[in-house]
């Protein structure tokens, strides 16, 4: 197994952990953290492909990862702001209780 | 080199798995920081120093602290007296776990069935911060400006979202 495959497997495991957390946890903050973990798995893929790709001098993987980290940080800030606003409304961060629109 | 990779990969996976599996949210965030530091070390091992340190700065320094503050502001002392303790039903657990496991199985199958033909690993590329800065200022200057705009919008939006409404204040 080459080293690139090992990194890709770690990234796939990280993505699955984040997906399981986002699907199973009922705390809204931890669901957001699970989504962040999935973004991190994609970043690890970018860096691994940049390192073992044919043209590492092009810096494309690094640039994409830097911009992706920036977007993830902005997403975390807005997401936690939304969670705080919802908490002020419902006094809970349990997503199974956020069912006002449920038919 | 491969032993170092194995240790760091185990640290990352165990930390993030604990972050998604532990019961109390504050413990989850602490485990998450361990996992994210492991991930930053993996970036350093791959030769991407700038990205590794950015990862520590942004995720461990900002996102984890922000999540800790959000937990403090939303749950405070009544973490243990919730009427519905956080425990998903067994069918939910089974379905979610099956979906995540199936996704991992498909990705792992795709990775393992498509091994790269060339087994020679290229030499470690050396990228200095100067090169990254010059690329950001020349080739990627438009995305950089858009990122600045996005961060400003996110800053203002987060403040407006978290601000109490006027009638609630009185």
Image (tube, helix red, strand yellow):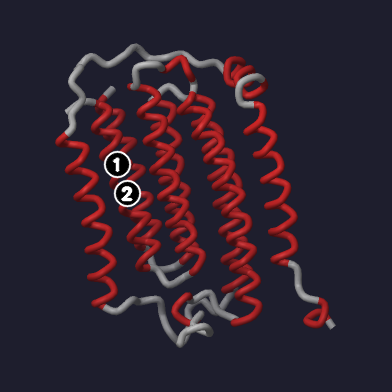
Q: Name the residue carrying label 1.
A: B10
Crowding at mark 1 (Cα within 10 Å: few <14, some 14-19, many 20+): some
Instruction: Between residue B74 and residue A37, name the one nearer to us.
Output: A37
Q: Residue at x 38, y 22 (%)?
A: A51
Q: Residue at x 50, y 62 (%)?
A: B26
Quadrant into which the N terminus of chain B falls: top left
Chain ID of residue with mark 1? B
Mark 2 secondary-structure assignment = helix
Chain ID of residue with mark 2? B
Q: Residue at x 36, y 29 (%)?
A: A48
Please identify the quarter of the rendering in which residue A88 is found. Answer: bottom right
Left or right relative to B37: residue B91: left
Q: CA distance from mark 2 to mark 1?
A: 6 Å
The x, y position of residue B31, in whole percent, is 42, 53
Instruction: Between residue A63 and residue B81, name the one nearer to us.
Output: A63
Mark 1 secondary-structure assignment = helix
Asked whether the beta carbons under mark 2 and mark 1 sit within 8 Å of each other, the answer is yes
Q: Residue at x 18, y 20 (%)?
A: B117
Left or right relative to A3: residue A65: right
Q: Name the residue carrying label 2.
A: B14
Crowding at mark 2 (Cα within 10 Å: few <14, some 14-19, many 20+): some
């Amino acid at each position: 197994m080459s080293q690139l495959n090992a990194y890709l497997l770690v990234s796939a495991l990280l993505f699955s952990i984040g997906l399981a957390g986002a699907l199973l946890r009922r705390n809204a903050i931890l669901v957001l953290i699970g989504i962040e973990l999935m973004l991190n798995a994609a970043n690890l893929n970018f860096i691994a492909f940049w390192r073992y790709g044919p043209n590492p001098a092009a810096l494309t993987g690094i640039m994409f990862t830097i911009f992706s980290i920036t977007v993830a940080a902005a997403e975390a800030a807005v997401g936690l702001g939304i969670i705080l606003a919802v908490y002020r409304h419902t006094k809970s961060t349990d997503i199974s209780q956020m069912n006002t629109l449920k038919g | 080199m491969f032993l170092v990779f194995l240790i760091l990969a185990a640290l990352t996976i165990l930390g993030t798995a604990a972050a998604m599996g532990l019961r109390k949210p504050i413990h989850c965030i602490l485990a998450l920081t361990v996992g994210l530091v492991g991930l930053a070390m993996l970036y350093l091992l791959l030769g991407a120093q700038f990205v590794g340190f950015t990862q520590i700065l942004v995720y461990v320094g900002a996102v984890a602290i922000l999540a800790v503050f959000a937990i403090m502001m939303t749950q405070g002392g009544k973490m243990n007296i919730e009427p519905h303790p956080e425990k998903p039903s067994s069918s939910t657990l089974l379905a979610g776990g099956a979906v995540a496991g199936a996704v991992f199985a498909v990705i792992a199958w795709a990775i393992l069935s498509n091994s790269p033909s060339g087994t020679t690993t290229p030499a470690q590329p050396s990228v200095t911060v100067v090169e990254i800065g010059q690329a950001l200022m020349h080739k990627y200057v438009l995305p950089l400006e858009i990122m600045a705009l996005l961060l400003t919008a996110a800053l203002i939006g987060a403040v407006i979202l978290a601000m109490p409404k006027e009638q609630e204040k009185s």
